[in-house]
Image (cartoon, rainbow, N blue to C red):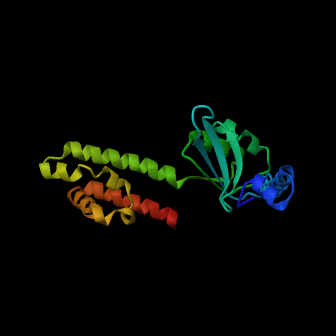
Amino acid sequence: AQLTTTAHAARHLGVSWDTVRDIESRYLGKQYRKPKLKHLKQIAIDEIYLGKSVKFLTVVLDLESGAIVFIGRGKGEQALAAIWSTTIRLAPVAAAMSTAYALAVRKHLPDAVLVNDRFHVIKLYNVMLTELRRELQREAETQLQKNVLKGTRWLLLKRLDNLDESRNEPGRLLQALRLNQSLAVAYYLKDDLNEFWEQ
C-alpha cells in the first residue's frame, strides 16, 4: 500500500479491494490510535489557518516525539476545552504569543512553565527591527545613508549564515550596520535571541 494504489495491491495479491482496505485500516488504527495524553511531559500549542471554510484549527504537539496529540476547531481557550479534561501533568508548555492560550494554560495548568515559541518571538522582533530601519531611513541626513539603507529590509530579516554571497548580501548588510549603530545593535541582539533557543 505504501508503493501502489489499493486497487493494484488487491489485484497483485489476488484479494478484494475491501480486504486490502481493511488491512490498511487496521494497521493505521494500531499505528496512529488516539494518543494517551496523561503521559505528556511537554507540549506546544499553535493555530493554523485553513482558509475561509474551516478557518482556524488549534494544534497541540508532544514536544518530545513531535507527534500531533490534539486538534481543536477554532483558536483560543474554547478550542482546547477537550484537552483539559485529561489528567495532564506538564512542566513546560510552548505556545504561540496569544493571550487566550496563556490564560488557558494558567487556568488549567497553573504549575506549568509557559514559554513563548521561537517563531513568534523572532517574528515580533523582526517587526520591531523593520520599524527601526524605516525610522532610520526617514531620519537619514546624507544621500549615502539613504542609499545604503534602501533595500536592506530583507537582509535584516535573514540570519548571518543565510545571507547570499553571490548577491553580495553580507557586504551590503555590513555597510548598513557600520553606518547605523542602533541598527547594528538591534540586528546582533536578534542573533543573540536566536542563540538562546539553540542553547
Residue 101 quadrant? top right
Residue displayed at 39% across by 63% down: 162
Q: Position of residue 146 (x, y in %)?
A: 18, 48
Q: Position of residue 120 (x, y in %)?
A: 50, 49
Q: Nearer the viewer, residue 59 or 199?
A: 59
Q: Total marks drawn?
A: 0
Question: Residue 166: percent from the left, percent from the top?
Answer: 29, 65
Looking at the image, which is closer to me, 135 or 5?
5
Query: Is residue 80 depicted above or below 94 in this figure?
Result: above
Q: Of residues 19 and 92, which is closer to you in this image?
A: 19
Q: Nearer the viewer, residue 44 or 3?
A: 3
Vertically, is 51 above or below 91? above
Residue at point 84%, 56% (across, down): 23
Is residue 138 shown above or below 10? Answer: above
Task: Decide if residue 103 is in sight here.
Answer: no
Seen from this angle, which residue lies furthest bottom?
Answer: 199
Give the residue drawn at x 18%, y 50%.
147
- Residue 164 visible? The answer is yes
103 versus 191 height, above or below = above
**Residue 122: image location, x then y, percent:** 45, 53
Q: Quadrant of the N terminus?
A: bottom right
Does 147 sit left or right of 109 as displayed? left
Q: Residue furthest top?
A: 53
Position of 66 compared to 23: left or right? Answer: left
